Structure formats: structure tokens, C-alpha cells
Image (spheres, rainbow, N blue to C red):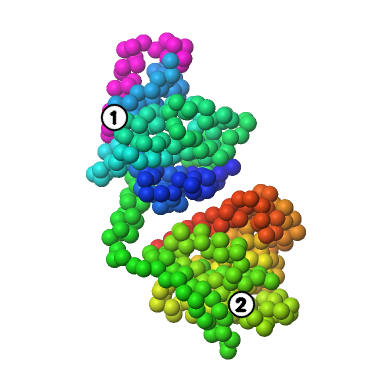
């Protein structure tokens, strides 16, 4: 179900977009919940902290939880396990003292001198990599209440069926997108469920805190949103360049046949990217006179040349000079994007194809170096087969993402939003890698 915790965090974040706002604090449960929480915090552009809780294991069977302890002196017990295991008060006190000491030590280590983020009057979004027994998550919810959170939301990528009922007395809301009918352990739903170490938790908290601090301390910058004209090989192409303040990349859109810079689907995707601080250039690959000539609509070489020319224009624009560049192509525009990306002079960081025809660019696909994401609807069977065939010719990093229930135009409820989220994550990840060198 999930490649790793990072993948789980990105998928979980798509179910949490309605929580985006200034009052939300994302709280990862160390250790495994923090890589998931990091991706959620990035997607929501929210503060990131930890709530440190520790399982209270039965003395003779430590993997069996009889409860949990957390910051602020919170203790949660499972009376049934305590009774069945015949745990004495002395044994309970000994385990609790040890684990409470560990809670204090780890909280100090993870935050490394930074103060705990205040939850007073805010929404505490508690994130873990999954939930099984729920003792640790329940303790975290109680800790958040004790710290003054006005609202507590528990979010996990996967859990057993009916998981929300377990937390109705602890959380105001439970978000768990995957609730498989057969559930033994959280790890069974991850390809990579390797242990997360303390230094990884600390590094993720540092990284996000440093990024937020750097962004907050940077001089205020205004974004750009203007109509532009791009001269390419003697032809003037109309477009719209939008660059949010603090943009970390720019994406050029290559529309498909019968479409233009006014495409409502591409404009929707562009809006999602802009909210993630990615600049966009929506422009016409053909002039008004040319767009009625079907030969030109399917002239992939011509479209690619014009996309490459627009790329040169973008690199010279002062608002985006030096930023990593990506291509987003739909239908025949996806073929043009891949054809242009095959040019070694373009230095494109990432390409996303939505319902695209990469098969029309097969002669050039083995030259593409940009990380490529192919997004296809599960009900767009013909194009899905064409994408699978084209994928065989790619030598770069690539992935085929199939959106359940979507047809070619992604008109079904929620499918375009899912495709846009996939594109946003792909560009953001690879722009970050490109910027890091």
C-alpha cells in the first residue's frame, strides 16, 4: 500500500487539505510517525513538532502494551491487559518510572534546545505511521488536550476497520484513509518499514524548522501574475506567468490537442502548484490561426521546439531566473514535454504527464534525463496501455501512477484533485533535489 513512510505521508496529506490554516500544528509520534508528519507539515505548510509518548510494556512480554505515558504526566492504561497479565502495582510503578524518564530525555533530545510549539487554542494534528492497539495515539491525544489544544485530530495512513470508534473519547476527528478488512500489523502495509532512528527524527525537525525560519527571515517579496508574449522562431505565443512569493521552481504547461492556456483542468493544476510555491507558465503552443490545423496539432517535433523556446525565455525572466524547471503535459502536450526534455541543453528537473501520449515521443524517450511521472486514469484503458508501453523506453527515474476511477479527462469527482496532488509532490520533491545540487 505504501512504499515507505515518506510515501505514506504524502498520501495521507491529500486527505488533510481541508485542515490547512494558521492554527494547525502537526505533531509526529516518534519515531516512525515523524517522517510521515514531516510530509504532512510540508503539504499543509504548518509548524512541526513532536509529542513524545512511550508504551508501557508488560514486564514479562514488553511488546504487549498495557498502556502508555506521555509528556505533562499523562498516563493511559489498558485495564483489561493489566488484569489479564496480573501486573502488580509495584511492577507497574517500575515500568512507568523508567518510561517516563525516557519521555523526558527524548523530548529534550529531539527538540535540541528549541522550545515546544504552543498548542494553546490551536488544532493539534497528531500523525503516526499507522495505528494498531492505539494506546500510544490515545496518550498523545490526551497530552495535546493537557497542553491546551482546542481541537485534536488524529491522522494515520492505515489502521483496522472502524478505527475512529476507538478514539471517539480522545480525538475530535480521526483521519485514516486506508482501513483494510484484514489487519495484523502496521508494517504489513509498507514495502519499507525499517526502523526510524533518533537522529533521523532530530534531523527532520531541524530541517523543517530551519526552512521555516529561513523563509520567515527572508525579505518580503511580492509574487508575479501577468500576461506575457513569448517570441519563438518568429511566432508570438500568448501566455500567463504566475510566480508566488518564495517560489522554489517553475512549471511550463504543454496543453493537449484542442486545448489552450485557458484549459480549466490545467488552470486547476496550476493553482495547486502555485499554492505549493511553484511558479507556472500557461501558454499556447500554437497561434489562433494554427490551432485549427490538425497536422500542426499532432506535430510533436514542432510543439517540442516551441516548448524549448519558451524554456529559454523563462530562464531569462528575472522573476524565475535560476529556479529549477519542470514540464507538465496533457495528451499530445505530454509527448511534446518529453520530446523537449530529451534535449540535453534544456536541463529540466522533472516532467509530469496527465492522461498523456508519451508513446508519440518514443523515438526520444531514451534520451530523457528528467524524473518523469506518468498519471493515467484507471478507466482510460487505451491510454494506460500506451503509457505502459512508453514507460519501457524511459531510462530516467520514472513512475506510473494510476488514479482509480478516472477516465481520460479526469472529470470524475476528486480524480483531478488527486492527479494535481501527485504532480505537486513530484515537482516539489525534484525541485528540492535540483536546488540541493
What is the residue that sits farthest to the left in this orientation? 113
Q: Residues within 10 Å of mark 2 (few under 14, many from 20)?
A: many
Picture quadrant where residue 102 is located: top left
Quarter holding the C terminus?
Answer: bottom left
Task: Residue 400: say if magenta.
Answer: no
Task: Write the residue at 47% across / 69% down.
Answer: 242
Task: Residue 81: say if magenta.
Answer: yes
Task: Write the residue at 58% across / 89% down.
Answer: 234
Question: Where does label 2 land, which residue?
Answer: 285
**Coordinates of residue 132 in the picture (x, y in percent):** 51, 29
* Above or below 292: residue 279: above
Mark carried by residue 124:
none
Count of numbered marks: 2
Quarter holding the N terminus?
Answer: top right
Q: Secondary structure at mark 2?
A: loop
Q: Residues within 10 Å of mark 1 (few under 14, many from 20)?
A: some
**Coordinates of residue 400 in the picture (x, y in percent):** 63, 56
What is the residue that sits farthest to the bottom in this orientation? 234
Q: Is residue 98 left or right of residue 339?
A: left
Task: Decide which of 187, 113 is in the foreground and name it.
Answer: 113
Going from N to C along the chain, the mark reached first, 1 or 2, is: 1
Amino acid at each position: 500500500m505504501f512504499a515507505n513512510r515518506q510515501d505514506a505521508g504524502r498520501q495521507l496529506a491529500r486527505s488533510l487539505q481541508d485542515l490547512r490554516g494558521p492554527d494547525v500544528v502537526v505533531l509526529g509520534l516518534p519515531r516512525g510517525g515523524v517522517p510521515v508528519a514531516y510530509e504532512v507539515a510540508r503539504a499543509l505548510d504548518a509548524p512541526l513538532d513532536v509529542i513524545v509518548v512511550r508504551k508501557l510494556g508488560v514486564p514479562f512480554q514488553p511488546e504487549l502494551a498495557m498502556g502508555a505515558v506521555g509528556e505533562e504526566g499523562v498516563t493511559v492504561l489498558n485495564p483489561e491487559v493489566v488484569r489479564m497479565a496480573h501486573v502488580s502495582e509495584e511492577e507497574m510503578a517500575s515500568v512507568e518510572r523508567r518510561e517516563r524518564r525516557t519521555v523526558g530525555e527524548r523530548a529534550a533530545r529531539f527538540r535540541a534546545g528549541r522550545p515546544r510549539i504552543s498548542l494553546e487554542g490551536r488544532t493539534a494534528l497528531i500523525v503516526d505511521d499507522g495505528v494498531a492497539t492505539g494506546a500510544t495515539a490515545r496518550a498523545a491525544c490526551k497530552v495535546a488536550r493537557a497542553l491546551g489544544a482546542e481541537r485534536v485530530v488524529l491522522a494515520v495512513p492505515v489502521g483496522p476497520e472502524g478505527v475512529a470508534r476507538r478514539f471517539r473519547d480522545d480525538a475530535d476527528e480521526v483521519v485514516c484513509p486506508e482501513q483494510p478488512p484484514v489487519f495484523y500489523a502496521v508494517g504489513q502495509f509498507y514495502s519499507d518499514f525499517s526502523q526510524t532512528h533518533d537522529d533521523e527524527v532530530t534531523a527532520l525537525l531541524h530541517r523543517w524548522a530551519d526552512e521555516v525560519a529561513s523563509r520567515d527571515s527572508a525579505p518580503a517579496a511580492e509574487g508575479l501574475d501577468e500576461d506575457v508574449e513569448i517570441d519563438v522562431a518568429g511566432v508570438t505565443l500568448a501566455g500567463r506567468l504566475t510566480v508566488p512569493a518564495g517560489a522554489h521552481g517553475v512549471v511550463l504547461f504543454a496543453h493537449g490537442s484542442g486545448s489552450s492556456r485557458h484549459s480549466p483542468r490545467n488552470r486547476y493544476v496550476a493553482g495547486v502548484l502555485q499554492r505549493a510555491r511553484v511558479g507556472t507558465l500557461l501558454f499556447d503552443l500554437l497561434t489562433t490561426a494554427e490551432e485549427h490545423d490538425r497536422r500542426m496539432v499532432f506535430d510533436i517535433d514542432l510543439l517540442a521546439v516551441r516548448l524549448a523556446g519558451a524554456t529559454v525565455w523563462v530562464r531569462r525572466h528575472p522573476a524565475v531566473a535560476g529556479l529549477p524547471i519542470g514540464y507538465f503535459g496533457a495528451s499530445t502536450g505530454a509527448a511534446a514535454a518529453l520530446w523537449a526534455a530529451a534535449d540535453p541543453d534544456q536541463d529540466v528537473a522533472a516532467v509530469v504527464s496527465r492522461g498523456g501520449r508519451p508513446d508519440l515521443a518514443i523515438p526520444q524517450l531514451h534520451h530523457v534525463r528528467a524524473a518523469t511521472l506518468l498519471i493515467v486514469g484507471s478507466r482510460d484503458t487505451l491510454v494506460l496501455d500506451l503509457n505502459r508501453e512508453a514507460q519501457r523506453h524511459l531510462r530516467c527515474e520514472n513512475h506510473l501512477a494510476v488514479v482509480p476511477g478516472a477516465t481520460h479527462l479526469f472529470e470524475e469527482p476528486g480524480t483531478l484533485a488527486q492527479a494535481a496532488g501527485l504532480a505537486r509532490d513530484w515537482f516539489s520533491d525534484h525541485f528540492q533535489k535540483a536546488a540541493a545540487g
